[in-house]
Structures are given as C-alpha cells and as structure tokens.
C-alpha cells in the first residue's frame, strides 16, 4: 500500500519521459547553436586575417583596398556575433550539465544582457564609417572591461573551490573553459582596437598618400596577425575542453 501511494504521488512514467525528452531536445538545440557560433567565430577570424593582406597592399588602388576592408568588416561581424552568443549558450547548457547552478531567471538575465550587447555590436557595425559607429564601438569595448574581469575571477575562484561554478571531479572543465573564454575576449579586445584604427587611418589615406599612416597601418596589422595565431589556438583549446570534458 505504501508503494502504491508513492506511485500515485509520482507523475506518470510517460510524463517523466516527456520532460526528459524536452530537456534533451533543448540541450540538443543549444549544442547545435554552440557549434555554429564556434564555427563562425573561428572561420570569421581566418577570413579577416586573409583579407588584411590586401588592406595593407600599397600597390593596390585605394578604392580596392577599401573594398577589402569592407569585406573584412562584413566577415568580422559574424565572428563577433559568434563569440557573443557562445557565453549564453554555454551558460544555458552548463545548467543542464550541472556544472553551474544558476537556472531560471539567471539564464534569462544572461540571455537578455548578451542580446542587448549583440544589438550594440551590430549597431556599431552598421554605423562603422561614422563618428557614431566609432562611439558605439568604444562602448562595446567598455562592456568588455567589466565582463572580462568578472569571467576570469569567477572561473579562478571556482577552480579554487570557492564557487560559483561547480568544480568537483569531472566538472573542472567548465571553469577552465570559462577562463580560456575570458582570455579569448582579451585577445578579441586588442583586435577590436586594431580594426577601429583601420577606420581612422583609412579616413586619412582617403585624403591622399601618407607614408607615415601607411607604416602605422602595416605595423598595426602585423601585430594583429600575431594575435590571430594565439586567438586560433585559444579557440581550438576552448572547443577541445567543451567536446572532451577531460577534468
């Protein structure tokens, strides 16, 4: 009789399975979105890297170089979109995996915050050739000044056992992944500085030849290419930890 009473209190097996399937379905969609965002992030950065060779090619007419710069911006916005979507997707999946304890309203807040940030990023892209676009880009950068330390500190604190993320046996991969993501944002911030310089310097070059600005442009992009190699290694390492979950 006691067993019968417990069974009556529990939801039917079919409903339990339905809830489990709903969770699996949501998790599957989140994983799909995470993979797509990672692909655009990694592939976009490669596209910008290759296009930069023609941006600094002094033998090309200025109009041609500007077209390549425009192409770089159009590719880069997809990479920026990917990187900003990765955190809420990873945060959401982390709740299902039990490696971060904040669900419900916390998931909604994270999605809304990154949605608004993404809108700002796209607004800066659309207005990129104007003073408004440069101002919006600066605000995009300022947000990173807050987000990056928050991500890095919470990841390190979690690895040391202070939370907020769960970092028991088989769970440390999440905090390591978050820490690496914070490092990638730092590299991305430096690359944002470089691309903002492009806009400013091309305004000067549009007025006529300027050897000093050309030298600065080449130096800027050489530094950006060096960062790009480190960026790719970091992105691939993040993907490795997410796929294998080794610790």
Image: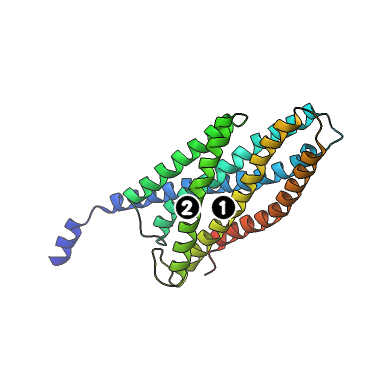
Question: Would you place residue 45 above or below residue 229 in this image?
Answer: above
Residue at the spot x=45%, y=48% of the render? 88
> Would you name the residue on which mark 2 appears?
147
Q: Mark 2: which secondary structure? A: helix
Task: Tell whether 176 sits left or right of 192.
Answer: left
Q: Is residue 42 visible?
A: yes
Percent across and percent down for residue 34 are 53, 48
Percent across and percent down for residue 244 are 56, 63
Please tell me which residue lies in front, 3 or 114. 114
Q: Residue furthest right?
A: 59
> Which quarter of the figure has residue 241?
bottom right
Percent across and percent down for residue 144 are 51, 49
First in sequence, mark 2 or 1: give its number: 2
Q: Are marks 2 and 1 in contact (CB under 8 Å)?
A: yes
**Between marks 2 and 1, how big is the CA–CA gap?**
9 Å
Q: Is residue 32 visible?
A: no
Residue at the spot x=69%, y=54% of the render? 227
Give neighbour class at mark 1: few <14, some 14-19, many 20+ (Cα, 10 Å): many
Question: Would you place residue 2 above or below residue 194 in this image?
Answer: below
Question: Would you place residue 142 above or below residue 165 in this image?
Answer: above
The colour scheme used to paint the residues is rainbow
Task: Tell whether 171 sits left or right of 198.
Answer: left
Residue at the spot x=53%, y=57% of the render? 182
Q: Residue furthest left?
A: 1
> Would you name the residue on which mark 1 appears?
185
Give neighbour class at mark 2: few <14, some 14-19, many 20+ (Cα, 10 Å): few
Percent across and percent down for residue 116 are 44, 39
Q: Mark 1: which secondary structure? A: helix
Q: Which quarter of the rendered picture does the N terminus lie within?
A: bottom left
The total of numbered circles placed on residues is: 2
């Amino acid at each position: 009789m006691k067993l019968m009473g417990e069974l009556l209190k529990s939801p039917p097996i079919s409903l339990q399975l339905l809830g489990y399937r709903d969770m699996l379905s949501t998790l599957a969609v989140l994983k799909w979105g995470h993979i797509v965002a990672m692909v655009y992030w990694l592939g976009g950065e490669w596209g910008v890297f290759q296009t930069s060779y023609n941006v600094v090619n002094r033998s090309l007419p200025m109009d041609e170089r500007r077209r390549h710069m425009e192409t770089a911006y159009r590719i880069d916005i997809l990479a920026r979109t990917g990187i900003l979507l990765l955190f809420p997707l990873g945060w959401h999946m982390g709740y299902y995996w039990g490696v971060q304890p904040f669900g419900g309203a916390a998931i909604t807040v994270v999605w809304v915050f990154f949605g608004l940030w993404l809108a700002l990023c796209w607004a800066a892209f659309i207005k990129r050739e104007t003073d408004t676009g440069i101002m919006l880009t600066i605000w995009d950068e300022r947000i990173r000044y807050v987000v990056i330390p928050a991500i890095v500190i919470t990841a390190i604190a979690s690895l040391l056992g202070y939370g907020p993320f769960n970092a028991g046996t088989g769970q440390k991969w999440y905090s390591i992944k978050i820490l690496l993501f914070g490092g990638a944002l730092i590299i991305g911030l430096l690359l944002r500085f470089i691309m903002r310089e492009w806009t400013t310097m091309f305004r000067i070059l549009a007025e006529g030849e300027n050897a000093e600005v050309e030298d600065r442009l080449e130096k800027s992009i050489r530094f950006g290419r060096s960062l790009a190699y480190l960026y790719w290694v970091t992105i691939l390492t993040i993907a490795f930890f997410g796929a294998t979950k080794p610790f």
